[in-house]
Image (cartoon, rainbow, N blue to C red):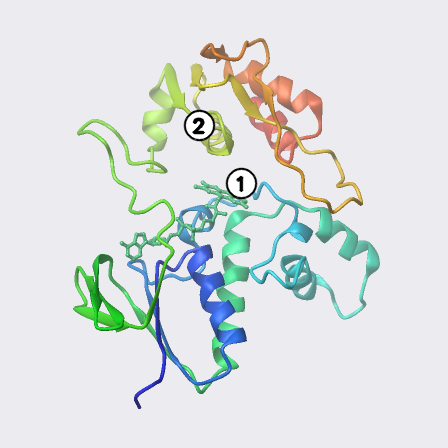
Amino acid sequence: MQHEINICVVGGGFTGAAAAIACLRHIERPFRLVIIEPTGSLGRGIAYGSHDPMHLLNVRARDLSVCADRPGDFSTWAFRHLDQGEDDVGLLEGVNHAFFSRQLFGEYVRQRLNETIARRPDVQFDIVAASAVACSRKGTGFRIRTDRAGTVEADVVVVATGYGASTASGQESLPPFGFVSTDQFAGARSMVLIGSGLTMVDVLLNARREGFAGEATILSRRGQIPREHAAKASCRRRWRSPRRRALPGSRPRYASRARPQRLMGRLAGRDQWTAADDFGHLAGS
Ligand SMILES: Cc1cc2nc3c(=O)[nH]c(=O)nc-3n(C[C@H](O)[C@H](O)[C@H](O)COP(=O)(O)OP(=O)(O)OC[C@H]3O[C@@H](n4cnc5c(N)ncnc54)[C@H](O)[C@@H]3O)c2cc1C
């Protein structure tokens, strides 16, 4: 069947899934929807494709949703999976304030996308497991060339490739978010972490779990680390720009050094960050 509109979403991570859901919910006529995603796995991307249950979200469940007009939808989804039909208010409160694993959030996005697709039998939906390599004009629309699945023609193209393909910058370097083996961690006496955001925290905690006992040097343009969350969210829902705090004992503008135990112990001592308990256990402090 020839559809009036052909929409192609390039990239099936969070943004691609959210765009697809928005199209499926708001375009009332039948149309064709194609998602080009090389992994074939939808709704995950780099952030939510992690299989490590210790890789936590940095946002509370109640503040996450794949639909802009349904705030708190992740919380609703998680609650429906956990509640035994009792509508337990205490459980809902706990779910609202929790920082779940990123893997679970990816599962939520994937399920919401599948549910939305199932509600639109009039939409022809296809997944193309390939990477888009070029996009050119064709008449009033576009032609997207892929590396292993030919071309896709569309009237509308949504580019949702996020961070793009993760590649190493040199022969000796790992790709960003690349895998470091347990042996490498256990045998290392020192490590340098470039960047001091949440991925630094994940990597450092992971290294500790894998037996790393050496010195960690964290390179940060501003000498800051992520600011801790309060133990419980306030009732205010107003969005505030994220603030960051200086690395303990450091001055902004200078590289900061701290032994992992000390850094993690200090953070754990604050008892407020999302993974403060994890820090405590892993650092052995
Ligand atoms: C490690 C990490 C942790 C994060 N944690 C959080 C968090 O806790 N909370 C939060 O709000 N945000 C977090 N973020 C930010 C998060 O990435 C964004 O919220 C969101 O997931 C970005 O989604 P995206 O779809 O734009 O990009 P991505 O997730 O990068 O998805 C892009 C997708 O496009 C595909 N793709 C790439 N190139 C091509 C191509 N040429 N052709 C076809 N497909 C292609 C990729 O395979 C991928 O699936 C985190 C980010 C990272 C890296």
Residue situated furthest right in the rendering: 89
Dot 2: element? helix
Drawn side of residue 173 relative to residue 274, left or right: left
Which residue carries the number 2 mark? 207
Q: Is residue 258 above or below residue 91?
A: above
Helix, strand or loop at label 1? It is loop
Q: Residues within 10 Å of mark 2 (few under 14, many from 20)?
A: many
Seen at 63% across and 58% down, the residue is: 74
Query: 10 Å neighbourhood of mark 1: few (<14), some, or many (≥20)?
Result: some
Where residue 148 sits: x, y (%)? Answer: 17, 63
Q: Amino acid at mark 2?
A: Ala
Please state which amino acid type lies under the numbered disc 1. Met
Q: Which residue is mark 1?
A: 54
**On screen, residue 4 above or below 167:** below
Q: In what quadrant of the picture does the C terminus appear?
A: top right
Q: Is mark 2 within 8 Å of ligand 1?
A: no
Picture coordinates of residue 154, whole percent (x, y): 29, 72
**Residue 201 visible in the displayed image:** yes
The answer to whether 267 is drawn above or below residue 68 in the figure is above
On-image quarter of the N terminus: bottom left
Camera-side residue of 272 and 160: 160
Relative image position of residue 111 (x, y in whole percent): 52, 67
